[in-house]
Image: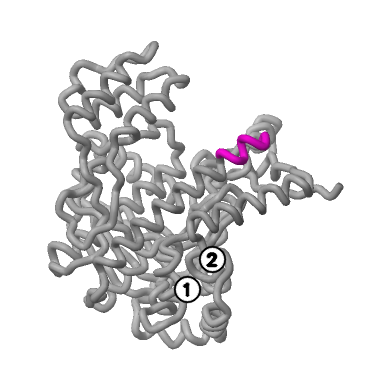
Amino acid sequence: MTDESAQAEAGTAEGQGPVEIDEELARHLENKREELFEKFDIRDAFPPEVLEEAEQRTTDVQEEIQSEVDERRDLREKIAFTVDPIDAQDFDDAISIDVRDDEIVLWVHIADVTHYVNPETAMWSEAVERGNTVYLPAYTIHMLPPILAETVCSLVPEEDRLAHTVEMHLDPENLGYENIEIYKSVIRSDERLTYTQAENRLDDPDAPLHDELSAVWELADSMHEQRKEDGSLVLNPKRDRAHTIIEECMLKANKAVTHELMWDRGVEAMYRVHPQPAPEEWDEALQEIQELDGVSIPGSAWDDPRKAVNATLEQAPPRQLDKIQWAVMKVMPRAKYMNDPFGGHHALNFEIYGHFTSPIRRLSDLINHWIVYTNDVPEDLVALCDRASERQQKAEKCEREYKQFLEEVGLNPAAVNNRGLEVIEE
């Protein structure tokens, strides 16, 4: 490693190592978490029957997968890889790509959680209670038992895994869907990459997976620019290439699945609906942004508030980015899960949208996997939508209050989140 690359590596979360705290501060953090869990009705420990059920589903894993091969598409020879944060404990999505003369084929493989967790299981009932995984800096409260989520449901490298694959054939000119297929598969991930590793591979032509990463980055960048051109709100214009790859590929897969459910099957599902602010609220936000020092909204962008914000964020001084983002967030209604997609997703500017790519950590995705597989809608779908929306809101409030507490005790929440914690004995 050169001096320059060693210096760059030292600046990453991997290079810096965990944030160190003493035992007394660790106890304070634990007490605060317990207080917040009680306040927001967050279940940390799993009931014994749920853990027992999860453990039973992790026995004879490879034998069970082999028995499934004939009933699924065998994609184990296809190059696939995951890209996640360094501290990720489960890997629920992997990517494959093939750039052809007349089309681009993008595969997003998602862990087939419903093979193990279905409405007849205690794990399903517990997932409904929890609603989602709660991510606090350096502490995670899982929706599914880790013994299941981090083993058979995790697309770990060099092991056969059951997946739910979204295969998208895209027009290379306009990136529209020429064909969408959703099916059960068996995959074998070639490598688990962190975001930093993916960035480094993109810069190194001789690195493994460089060609695949470069191809998917070129596609993701084009999809990102197209979304902005179409009026999708992009509040973080400085996102790196690795994050952009994951964000855009997951958006494309989620959108494909919910269009399949709505237009091709005409079934109810757990759609993500984001209402738009009232025109006067958008005017208020844009006026607040316009008055910031060193900030000017381009005159050509005023007609569409989302495009106006995108254009302003790209030109604004870095010191004003947080204020611009906050001005927008203040007027944005809360997105919610509904069994009816109409109303669309205002921020993304998608007519129909829903979640499918994270069934390990979101109830909505788990439900949609079940609907896609069985074409059967749970009788209590409306209640499940309300439950998922409520639990997400409480998780966000819990995370916000815990981060505030970290700041109060002198810790940087971002550093703790990116690097983790290590307790130093006194």
**At label 2, which amino acid type do we have?**
Val
The answer for how far apart the CA atoms under marks 2 and 1 are is: 8 Å
- Kind of residue at badge 1: Arg
Residue at x 42%, y 72% (from the top left corner): 113
Q: Residue at x 23, y 74 (%)?
A: 377
Q: Residue 282 vs residue 295: left or right?
A: left
Residue 128 on the magenta segment = no
* Residue drawn at 52 percent across, 39 percent down: 203
Residue span colored magenta? 404-410
Most common SS among magenta residues: helix
Residue 420 position, x and y percent, is 65, 47
Q: Quadrant of residue 100?
A: bottom left
| Residue beneath disc 2 | 156
Instruction: Determine whether label 2 and label 1 are within 8 Å by CB.
Output: yes
Determine the secondary structure under disc 1: strand
- Provide the residue designation for mark 1: 161
